[in-house]
Image: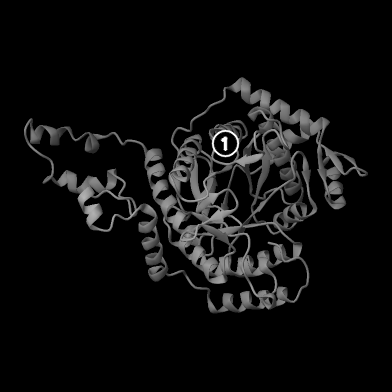
């Protein structure tokens, strides 16, 4: 049995068939005439074996159009991802949407408003909060770094060990050194789960060595892959949304081809991480309306044109969980959800990949309850129309004491946990607390009460052995 997530009954399309065709033809043209650089000779050989045209001097790989069409036809339209606790397994594909946490480099101290590298304990607490929240269906490492002592060894191994011990839902990770990736795969197998690898190419059209090794290692292990490239309109891609969509998808399909060459049945999740650049300042823009528009078109391309899964990301340009952070994330989440991707990465992020907070994850969780209710829509049947009840009450009666009201009010209405719905007088009397203060209290409550399914004795032994083994290997300590 898998976690249901949310069903998007009628996804919103923003492109017509002719526009989809033109985008697809552009992708084919770019892959066939420009190609993609793969910075690993072995990958070039594998792709040449598939039928690609390879220039080994430049490592530039060109994909014939017929081959691209074949790659897209063979891709898996749906697949299952195993969680450590199998009641949280995910069925990816179709119109089902899952919400996931986002990953950043640092945590935000809400008191001083300064960023800092999280401690081991803060990393554990962030994972436990995400595991507890009911609108979190899967968990990325909340932070991309950790404040460890030198003798504690490899940070990537430590962070993924913490993730596996403190999260029972589907976990994601990011590519780093090959050693770290092998450790992650071993830990996942030891705990009977699959971990989704998020990896990034190097736009415009290139895959670096570590990203390639990530594809090879995870595809061989039959673990799903998710590609999200840092597309920047006007910098490493065309400034137009349509042009960026062509380039973004061309790079994704090239990665998909390599994964399929290793494992034809591997689960693959195209994800957009495209953003604008404010040309007046050179500053990257995360919470723009253009991201929402682009994400809707990206989702439609993969959902409707290719009949394949997709994922999107919600970001903000705010540096603190304030009104700007709230409206940027909420509006982009709504429009992206209506388009019907299979994943939206959103929980906890404040400022792009730089700031994250478990308190913000709690607030996001509440916002996502509203989004989920929007997707659910309005039920129309004899019970909800309540015609007989209206007749019974008549023109001057009331509905408070009716059985129908008791049965339906919780089913029909979202009941928030940290939003304030009291009167002004009650709010003042209770300390005039804002949503951040209320979310802090909820976070403390989660950390006091939430219990994560522990590892079995055998799993505990295997994880400890894997961690000890990889701490002895001296190489990159990047995640």
In this rendering, the answer to whether 154 lies above or below 80 is below
In this rendering, the answer to whether 358 lies above or below 304 is below
In this rendering, the answer to whether 223 lies above or below 36 is below
Q: Is mark 1 on a helix, strand or loop?
A: helix
* Quarter of the image where the C terminus is located: bottom right
Where residue 265 sits in the image (x, y, percent)? Answer: 67, 49
Residue drawn at point x = 64 percent, y = 68 percent: 187
Q: Name the side, left or right, on which 80 lies relative to 62.
A: left
Residue drawn at point x = 81 percent, y = 31 percent: 32
Q: Can residue 100 be seen in this view?
A: no
Furthest-top residue in this view? 18
Q: Name the side, left or right, on which 40 lies relative to 404.
A: right
Residue that carries the numbered disc 1 in the rendered image: 291
Q: Is residue 433 visible?
A: yes
Where residue 378 sits in the image (x, y, percent)? Answer: 32, 35
Instruction: Please tell me which residue lies in front, 325 or 397.
Output: 325
> Residue 181's quadrant in the figure?
bottom right
Instruction: Please tell me which residue lies in front, 99 or 431.
Output: 431
Q: How is the image coloured?
A: one colour
Q: How many labels does the image show?
A: 1
Where residue 120 sits in the image (x, y, percent)? Answer: 57, 71
Instruction: Please tell me which residue lies in front, 158 or 138.
Output: 158
Q: Name the side, left or right, on which 429 lies relative to 251.
A: left
Furthest-right residue in this view? 57
Where residue 96 sits in the image (x, y, percent)? Answer: 49, 43
Q: Name the side, left or right, on which 238 lies relative to 47.
A: left
Residue drawn at point x = 67 percent, y = 27 percent: 23
Q: Residues within 10 Å of mark 1 (few under 14, many from 20)?
A: many
């Amino acid at each position: 049995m898998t976690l249901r997530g949310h069903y998007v009954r009628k996804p919103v399309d923003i492109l017509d068939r002719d526009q989809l065709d033109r985008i697809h033809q552009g992708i084919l043209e770019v892959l066939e005439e420009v190609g993609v650089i793969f910075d690993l000779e072995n990958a070039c050989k594998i792709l040449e074996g598939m039928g690609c045209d390879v220039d080994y001097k430049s490592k530039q790989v060109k994909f014939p159009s017929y081959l691209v069409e074949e790659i897209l036809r063979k891709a898996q339209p749906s697949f299952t991802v195993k969680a450590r606790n199998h009641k949280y397994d995910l069925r990816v594909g179709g119109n089902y949407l899952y919400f996931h946490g986002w990953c950043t480099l640092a945590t935000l101290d809400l008191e001083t408003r300064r960023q800092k590298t999280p401690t081991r304990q803060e990393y554990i607490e962030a994972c436990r909060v995400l595991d507890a929240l009911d609108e979190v269906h899967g968990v990325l490492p909340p932070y991309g770094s950790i404040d460890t002592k030198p003798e504690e060894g490899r940070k990537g191994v430590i962070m993924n060990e913490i993730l596996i011990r403190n999260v029972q839902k589907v976990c994601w990770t990011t590519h780093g050194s090959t050693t770290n990736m092998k450790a992650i795969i071993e830990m996942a197998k030891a705990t009977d789960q699959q971990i989704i690898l998020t990896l990034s190419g190097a736009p415009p059209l290139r895959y670096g060595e570590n990203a390639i090794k990530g594809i090879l290692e995870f595809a061989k292990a039959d673990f799903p892959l998710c590609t999200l490239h840092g597309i920047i309109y006007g910098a490493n891609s065309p400034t137009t949304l349509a042009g960026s969509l062509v380039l973004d998808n061309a790079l994704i399909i090239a990665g998909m081809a390599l994964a399929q060459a290793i494992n034809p049945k591997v689960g693959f999740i195209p994800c957009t991480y495209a953003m604008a650049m404010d040309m007046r300042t050179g500053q990257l823009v995360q919470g723009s309306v253009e991201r929402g528009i682009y994400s809707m078109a990206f989702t439609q391309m993969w959902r409707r044109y290719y009949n394949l899964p997709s994922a999107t990301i919600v970001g903000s340009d705010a540096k603190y969980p304030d009104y700007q952070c709230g409206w940027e994330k909420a509006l982009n989440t709504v429009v992206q959800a209506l388009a019907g991707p299979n994943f939206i990465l959103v929980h906890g992020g404040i400022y792009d990949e730089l700031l994250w907070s478990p308190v913000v994850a709690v607030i996001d969780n509440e916002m996502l309850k509203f989004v989920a209710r929007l997707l659910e829509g309005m039920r129309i049947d004899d019970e909800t129309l309540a015609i007989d009840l209206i007749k019974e009450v008549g023109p001057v009666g009331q509905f408070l004491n009716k059985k129908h009201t008791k049965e339906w009010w919780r089913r029909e209405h979202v009941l928030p946990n940290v939003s304030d719905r009291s009167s002004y007088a009650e709010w003042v009397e209770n300390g005039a607390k804002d949503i951040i203060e209320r979310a802090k209290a909820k976070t403390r409550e989660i950390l006091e009460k939430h219990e994560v399914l522990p590892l079995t004795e055998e799993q505990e032994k295997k994880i400890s052995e894997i961690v000890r083994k990889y701490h002895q290997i001296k190489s990159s300590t990047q995640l």
